[in-house]
Amino acid sequence: MKTRPTPSAPRLARPRPSASAADRPAWGLAVGGAMLGAVLALTAWAPARWLAWGVHQASAGQVQWLHPRGTVWQGSAQVQLSAGPGVPGAQALPGRLHWTLSPHWTGVRVDWQADCCMREASSLSLQPGQDSLRLQFSDHASVWPAALLAGLGAPWNTLQADGQLQLSTRSLQFHWAQGRLRMHGDAELHVQNVSLSLSPVKPIGSYRIHLSGTPEGTPTPRVALSTLHGPLMLSGQGQWVGQRLRFTGEASAQEGHEAAFDNLLNILGRRQGTRSLLSLG
């Protein structure tokens, strides 16, 4: 007797996903990719005016980058110093400042050059760490017009200094760690053939300001002021302690120029005979 095979239960057909559900992941990837591409493009082509705005905000309007061109990463602008927004007497550098920002794994490098005042580009490296920041400058030499300082307001707009500021740096580094600053290397500023509106003698002289750290770094960099030549003699010593400069020195006139510098010596500091005692901090 033949047995009939037991009929199997009918299989239920699986519902096919709708076209909109199947396409949703693809659309999500496409939108995400487009957004990522837009962010990368915006970052790569961020206009230079964004960086100019950042400099303006960080300096409270005292340093302004006018007519910026290019991008945040490579561009140029005209530098102007001002005592603040709307304050008259702003001073601008001739020519333009050029920069290039190069990010890397440990920080960012900034290459910069001013048309008016630098024969070759200089660089600055910023290396942030955990509760620390290191600024490292390349060895540098440049010459700047002293008249630029008048743009910063008092007392420079009263002094109306004229002459040249020759800046040089050697192995210069600043290292902030846990709220403390240490300085490595040194910087020198030669103030050449400077004239002041308050003095009838022009120029009053040339001077050297030396800011010195140590190879291992020091929290109290030293400042020394000396006279290179000229009828007004300036000298002094000081230290940076925290965020303050403590400085003592003196000013005096060469023999035969005492009467010409009498008023200026009264303004510079406390008179003690033929000398004027200088004190800061």
Image: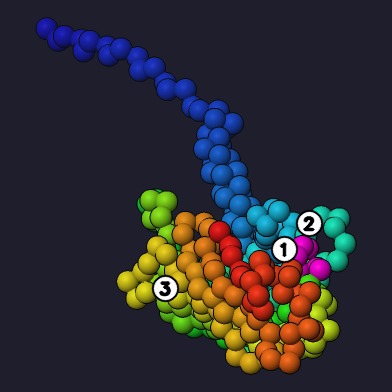
Question: Mark 1 and 2 residues: CB-CB less than 8 Å, in contact?
Answer: no
Front position among marks 1 and 3: 3
Give the crowd class for mark 1: few <14, some 14-19, many >=20 residues within 10 Å: many
Local secondary structure at mark 1: strand
Where's the C terminus, which quadrant? Answer: bottom right
Residue contact between numbered discs 1 and 3, judged by CB atoms under 8 Å: no
Q: Earlier in the sequence, mark 3 or mark 2?
A: 2
Q: Quadrant of the image for the N terminus? A: top left
Quadrant in the picture for residue 181 = bottom left
Q: Nearer the viewer, residue 175 or 9?
A: 175
Going by the numbered disc 2, the residue's amino acid type is Gly
Per the image, the residue denoted by label 3 is 213
- Label 1 sits on residue: 63
Disc number placed over residue 89 in the picture, else none? none
Does residue 106 appear left or right of residue 49 in this picture? left
Q: Earlier along the polypeptide chain: callout 1 or callout 2?
A: 1
Mark 3: amino acid: Gly
